[in-house]
Amino acid sequence: SNKTHTDENTSSLSGTSTDLSKNIQCAKADKGKLPISLVPMTIIKDIAAIRKYGEEKYHAPNNWVLVDKQRYVDAMWRHLIAYQEGEEYDKESGLPHLWHAACNMAFILEMESPDWDVRKQQLIASDPKLQEQLKKYMEDNK
């Protein structure tokens, strides 16, 4: 008798849970949105490792926004060519050339995006170190 009572409660609860879950799924309006879960996570981690290295090297996480896009194009190709020629790891960083190439491509894609000018200004506005670097750059290049 006790077992039947538990089974009834469980089935009643799971029925409610399923109904609730269906309602929540219907309410979640994600039609037309990108399925981010399809992106292999390895590339995200690889780029993050390169960004961490860059932050430690340059001491400003967003200073990449001040660099001309062509420099990233050139760097990406240098890393891809080194990889193609059989060199797996970058001599300076000790990290894989493909990780560097992926990070360079991420910067290029960001800079190619339609709203880049707005996002660049937002990054600069939110980063005092970047503002300082930009000011110094402007003074040095008068």
Image (cartoon, helix red, strand yellow):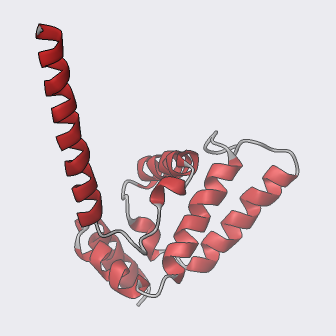
Image position of 96 with respect to 63: above or below: above
The percent coordinates of residue 44 (x first, y second) are 51, 51
The percent coordinates of residue 94 (x first, y second) are 64, 39
Which residue is situated farthest in the right direction here? 85
Residue 3: image quadrant is top left
Which residue is situated farthest in the front direction here? 1
State the residue at coordinates (39%, 87%): 117
- Of 12 and 106, nearer the camera is 12
User: Is 90 positioned to the left or the right of 123 in the image?
Assistant: right
- Of 68 and 26, nearer the camera is 26
Could you tell me which quadrant the N terminus lies in? top left
Image position of 141 with respect to 10: above or below: below
Q: How many marks?
A: 0
The percent coordinates of residue 4 (x first, y second) are 17, 15
State the residue at coordinates (54%, 79%): 68
User: Is 2 positioned to the left or the right of 37 in the image?
Assistant: left
